[in-house]
């Protein structure tokens, strides 16, 4: 599959265009590139921009075509489409006289609108420069995700560049999901997406049978202007506000998650049999007798990795077998296009929106027990210290010998469960080898200086009618860590292998702390009596050493949280920048092609490397992979945000009948308007607003992550424990408000300190 060109409205072809070359007036330095992409190439974007600049004034289509020497009617139509595409992308601006002019980066800035719940917004420029502030007045005519061209109006009192909207390039919000209100014959929808803080008016004849209070999808038929709200029509009635599963339906539409298979995909999978055909197994290494097993959670449905380990005279041989999704999902097919669009599977509580259809994700590509499956194998030799010496990759056919769960494996290896050991007696020696290689891999990881953050995850347990029964912590055991270390080893080996073959490929990039974050981190650590070594460029081993030094401290959770927040979010990119958290020069994702598109691209890269083709003949160029990495990173963030939104909805619903109840809590975040506290045992977060604190004026210290009372000296800091009461639950806003009941002994002690100092100062004056 090739990544779509932004001029997708032009007809592309792989046919040789040399004999169709037309004599344009200007020599195009990018003519060869255009000829490779289009059957009838026209002047490149770069040449169009140059010619417009030489004109010295805005030009219409006819003038631009004449200047370029584009005479053929078909070529003129293609030129018109390209000019429109350049306008959408912010390269050109069309004035009221239908003339095109070049967007001068010094005077005009193109970018995407980011809405804010409070009515203002920001412009995120295409060139990656700093965001510009958009006033509430200008935002009245805009919606989150619109593309616009702005000029810099000035600098506001907070030092931000302020934007003045020059032209709206593209409207990207054409529908919204929200709650319908009907008041005195006036109907409107309040979008659930808080980045769209405007009401969408719905005429009476456009209600489509919807009634007050229902959750609906509304199509925007008239975009907003500076003088009025947008106008829409009800396109779909999702149901009542508190209906079971409503939170997921809302999230799907809020985040534009593809959740229906196109007809082309249905047609592509219609002929797939439930078993692997014999001809597909030909030419592969036969591993069906190797006792590979899958180890996953109790509720897992797709099994894309299997492991096996045996001892060697110098250490171990570790096999990591991964489902060969690339055999079924070929580049350029409808299946591949949909997988690329989705980018990742989205895991909601008790529901999954898969990247691939179920016949593949839970069938042919799932390493189900006692069934022949195609796989890609990473076979590694490790020494006694857990260092990977040699790794080789090959296509194979396998047969999983058991579907094991984390709890079962932990019971066999750690708890010595005799019943489980008897049931899986033939596999126990191999599992013990896996445990031994895990311990050596873990040791090698520690010696490498990789960072190991221990975060607490929770799981929602549902009862009848999808009503939440409880929220429980997810307990990680050695089986979780065993699989994690095996997958990390395989991913690192894959990155090394592809680097040697020079085949272009995506990497998982994780940057270290920026200079600004590092300064804030060191200031905070100094206040709690700690120090991060490494100077201006600390390494992962310095983070790891600091984490080890705080084990058992009362503020361990606080320090770990601050360390974690000092690091960037991991992304996908073909540029080798390393993975800071894993202390690795190169890391990639190879082990989950059923649920992650980057892994599928890696499998294709491996197959290309194993073939006789040259690295430069791979279907993906470096630029293609840059675009793919950005897209996959965006899909990953979108999935995370959608999942968090659903979980927040469910947790609010769970708390509706707990108004007035008291809980012990830990301060999980501190802001200028109060602090968030996570309720112990149920892992739900709520806000203690600053107006509900003691009658005092509180100063916010973002570096110290605390609020401090000016008169009393009372302090509320990240990681402190408090007693709170549930005061309000707002399901629409996904917010839980808490009242402070009492301070902990630790906080009270910090409060009394300033009083002693004041008394001491008074005595000294006497």
Image (cartoon, rainbow, N blue to C red):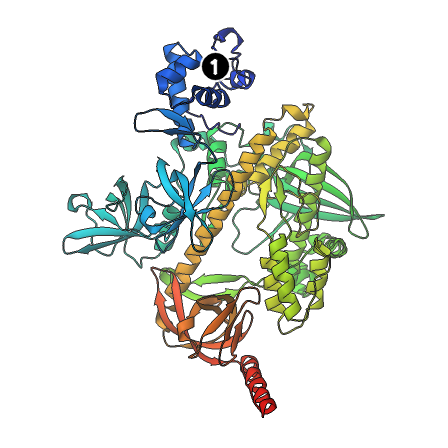
Q: Secondary structure at mark 1?
A: loop
Asked where in the image residue 538 lies, by quadrant, the reply is bottom right
Crowding near the residue tagged with mark 1, few <14, some 14–19, many ≥20 C-alpha atoms within 10 Å: some
Classify 649 as above or below 302.
Answer: below
Q: Is residue 682 left or right of residue 586?
A: left
Nearer the observer, 187 or 76: 76
Q: Is residue 492 above or below residue 432?
A: above
Give how far across and how far down residue 311 sits, in percent.
79, 49
Percent x, y of residue 436: 75, 56
In the foreground, 82 or 728: 82
Who's the residue at 47% across and 10% down the image? 24
Whether residue 242 is visible to the viewer of this picture, yes or no, is yes
Q: Quadrant of residue 502?
A: top right
In the rendered image, the residue lying farthest to the right is 313
Viewer-proximal residue, 529 or 329?
Answer: 529
Say if residue 405 shows up in the picture: no
**Residue 647, percent from left and from top:** 44, 58
* In this rendering, position of residue 482 left or right of residue 95: right
Q: Residue furthest left?
A: 185
Q: Quadrant of the C terminus?
A: bottom right
The residue at the far bottom in this view is 766
Horizontal side of 29 relative to 415 (left or right) equals left
Asked if residue 464 is positioned above or below residue 47 in the image, the reply reads below
> What is the number of callouts on the image?
1
Left or right: residue 368 versus residue 498 is: left
Return the x and y of residue 17 as percentages of the image width and height: 51, 11
From what the image shows, is residue 724 above or below residue 146?
below
Q: Which residue is mark 1?
A: 39
């Amino acid at each position: 599959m090739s990544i779509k060109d932004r001029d997708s409205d032009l007809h592309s072809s792989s046919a040789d265009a040399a004999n169709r070359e037309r004599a344009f007036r200007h020599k195009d330095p990018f003519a060869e590139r255009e000829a490779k992409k289009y059957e009838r190439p026209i002047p490149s974007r770069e040449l169009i921009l140059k010619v417009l600049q030489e004109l010295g004034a805005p030009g219409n289509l006819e003038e631009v075509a004449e200047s370029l020497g584009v005479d053929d009617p078909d070529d003129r139509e293609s030129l018109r489409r390209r000019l429109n595409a350049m306008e959408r992308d912010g390269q050109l601006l069309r004035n009221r006289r239908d003339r095109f002019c070049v967007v001068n980066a010094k005077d005009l800035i193109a970018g995407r609108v980011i809405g804010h719940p409070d009515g203002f917004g920001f412009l995120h420029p295409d060139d990656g420069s700093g965001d510009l502030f958009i006033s509430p007045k200008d935002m009245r005519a805009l919606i989150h995700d619109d593309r616009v061209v702005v000029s810099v109006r000035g600098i506001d009192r907070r030092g931000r560049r302020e934007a003045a909207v020059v032209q709206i390039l593209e409207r990207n919000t054409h529908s919204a999901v929200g709650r319908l209100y009907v008041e005195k014959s006036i109907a409107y929808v309040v979008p659930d997406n808080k980045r769209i803080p405007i009401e969408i008016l719905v005429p009476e004849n456009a209600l489509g049978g919807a009634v007050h209070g229902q959750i609906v999808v509304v199509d925007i038929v008239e975009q907003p202007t500076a003088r009025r709200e947008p106008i829409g029509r009800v396109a779909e009635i999702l149901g009542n506000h508190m209906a079971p599963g409503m939170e997921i339906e809302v999230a799907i539409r809020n985040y534009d998650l593809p959740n229906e298979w196109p007809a082309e995909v249905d047609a592509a999978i219609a002929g797939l049999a439930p078993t692997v055909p014999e001809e597909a197994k030909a030419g592969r290494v036969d591993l069906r007798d190797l006792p590979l097993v899958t180890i996953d959670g109790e509720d897992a449905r797709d099994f894309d990795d299997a492991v096996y380990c045996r001892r060697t005279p110098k250490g171990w041989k570790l096999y990591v077998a991964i489902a060969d999704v690339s055999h079924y999902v070929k580049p350029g097919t409808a299946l591949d296009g949909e997988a690329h669009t989705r980018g990742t599977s989205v895991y909601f509580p008790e529901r999954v929106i898969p990247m691939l259809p179920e016949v593949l994700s839970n069938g042919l590509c799932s390493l189900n027990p006692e069934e022949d499956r195609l796989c890609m194998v990473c076979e590694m030799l490790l020494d006694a210290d857990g260092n990977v010496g040699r790794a080789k990759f090959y296509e194979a056919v396998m047969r999983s010998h058991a579907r094991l769960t984390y709890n079962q494996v932990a019971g066999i290896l750690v708890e010595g469960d005799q019943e489980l050991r008897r049931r899986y007696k033939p596999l126990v020696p191999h599992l013990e080898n896996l445990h031994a290689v895990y311990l050596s891999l873990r040791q090698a990881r520690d010696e490498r200086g990789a960072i190991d953050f221990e975060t607490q995850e929770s799981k929602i347990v549902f009862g009848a009618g999808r009503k939440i029964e409880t929220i429980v912590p997810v307990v990680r055991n050695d089986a979780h860590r065993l699989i994690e270390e095996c997958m990390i080893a395989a991913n690192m080996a894959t990155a090394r292998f592809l680097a040697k073959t020079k085949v272009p490929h995506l990497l998982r990039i994780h940057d270290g702390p920026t200079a600004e974050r590092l300064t804030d981190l060191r200031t905070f650590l100094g206040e709690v009596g700690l120090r991060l070594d490494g100077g201006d460029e600390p390494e992962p081993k310095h983070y790891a050493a600091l984490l080890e030094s705080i084990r058992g401290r009362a503020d361990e959770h606080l320090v770990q949280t601050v360390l974690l927040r000092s690091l960037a979010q991991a992304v996908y990119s073909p540029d080798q920048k390393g993975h800071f958290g894993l202390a690795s020069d190169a890391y990639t994702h190879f082990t989950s092609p059923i649920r992650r598109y980057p892994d599928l691209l890696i499998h294709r890269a491996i197959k290309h490397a194993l073939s006789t083709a040259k690295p430069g003949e791979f279907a993906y160029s470096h630029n293609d992979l840059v675009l793919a990495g950005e897209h996959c990173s965006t899909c990953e963030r979108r999935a995370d945000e959608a999942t968090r939104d659903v979980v927040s909805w469910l947790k609010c619903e769970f708390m509706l009948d707990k108004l007035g109840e008291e809980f012990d809590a830990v301060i999980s975040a501190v802001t200028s308007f109060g602090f968030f506290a996570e309720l112990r045992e149920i892992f739900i977060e709520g806000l203690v607003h600053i107006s509900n604190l003691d009658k005092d004026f509180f100063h916010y210290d973002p570096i110290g992550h605390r609020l401090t009372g000016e008169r009393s000296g009372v302090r509320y800091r990240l990681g402190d424990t408090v007693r709170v009461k549930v005061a309000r639950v707002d399901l629409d806003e996904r917010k839980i408000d808490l009242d402070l009941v009492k301070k902990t002994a630790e906080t009270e002690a910090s409060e009394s300190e300033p009083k002693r100092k004041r008394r001491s100062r008074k005595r000294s004056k006497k």
